[in-house]
Image (cartoon, rainbow, N blue to C red):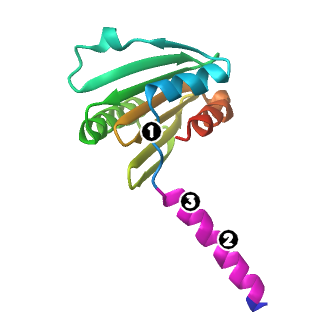
Amino acid sequence: MKRIALIALLAVGTLLLAACSPRDVISVEEFTTRMEGAGHDVIDLTEGFAHIPGMVAFVFADAGDFDVEFSVWETESAARLQFNNIHRQLEDAAGNTRSYRSTSVANFNRFTQTTSGRFEALVRVENTLLLIEASSGQRSAVEAVLDLLGY
């Protein structure tokens, strides 16, 4: 009996350690390679966003029923500030009719919410941001994209 309890405790500890460990940041090139490898079109829109202070790159992927926005910022602090701004905007737009989940560990922030038939995912890893807005029926497809990117 003690052996089973020890195995269960080790399994839970391993899951917690994996969930709380830092994430690996990806580059625009890696984002493009992974998304195109999954059959999605990627467009570099950096030039159109050059007026935004601190933004280094912005790419957009058409994932079929939803779009994926990926941006790179000059510093981790700039990305964190932008994450907080978008997070607040998503919360304000949703009002009180939502369910959400928020995680902040090491170099990583993740906020997801479902509201009014929409599923939204906002992720920061170091100096990068990823934003996906989709219908709530596309939640598993959104999660698959997040897994593909390691975000």
* Part of the protein shown in magenta: 3-21
Q: Nearer the viewer, residue 116 or 147?
A: 147
Residue at 38%, 26% in the rendered image:
71
How far from the left and from the top, in percent, is residue 8?
70, 76
Residue at left offset 67%, top offset 28% = 137
Write down the residue under mark 1: 123
Image: 84 above or below 20: above
Q: Quadrant of residue 45?
A: top left
| Tag 2 residue | 11
Q: In the orientation shown, which residue stands out farthest toward the top?
A: 48
The picture places residue 34, in percent across and down from the top left corner, at 59, 27
Q: Is residue 5 left or right of residue 42?
A: right
Residue pictured at 54% horizontal, 57% vertical: 19
Q: Judge by depth and name the residue closer to the eye, 113 or 34.
A: 34
Question: SS at mark 1?
Answer: strand
Crowd rating for badge 2 (residues with CA inside 10 Å; few <14, some 14–19, many 20+):
few
Question: Which quadrant of the view contains residue 10?
Answer: bottom right
Q: Is residue 19 magenta?
A: yes
Please state which amino acid type lies under the numbered disc 1.
Val
Please rate how many residues cluster around mark 1, counting C-alpha atoms within 10 Å: few if below 14, some from 14 to 19, many from 20: many
Q: Position of residue 102 (x, y in %)?
A: 45, 49
Location of mark 3 (residue): 18
For marks 3 and 2 on the same chain, the one whose residue lies earlier in the sequence: 2
Mark toward the start of the polypeptide (2 vs 1): 2
The Cα atoms of the two marked residues, 3 and 1, are separated by 17 Å
In the rendered image, residue 129 lying in the magenta stretch gets the answer no
SS at badge 2: helix
Taking the image as shown, residue 131 lies to the left or right of residue 75, namely right
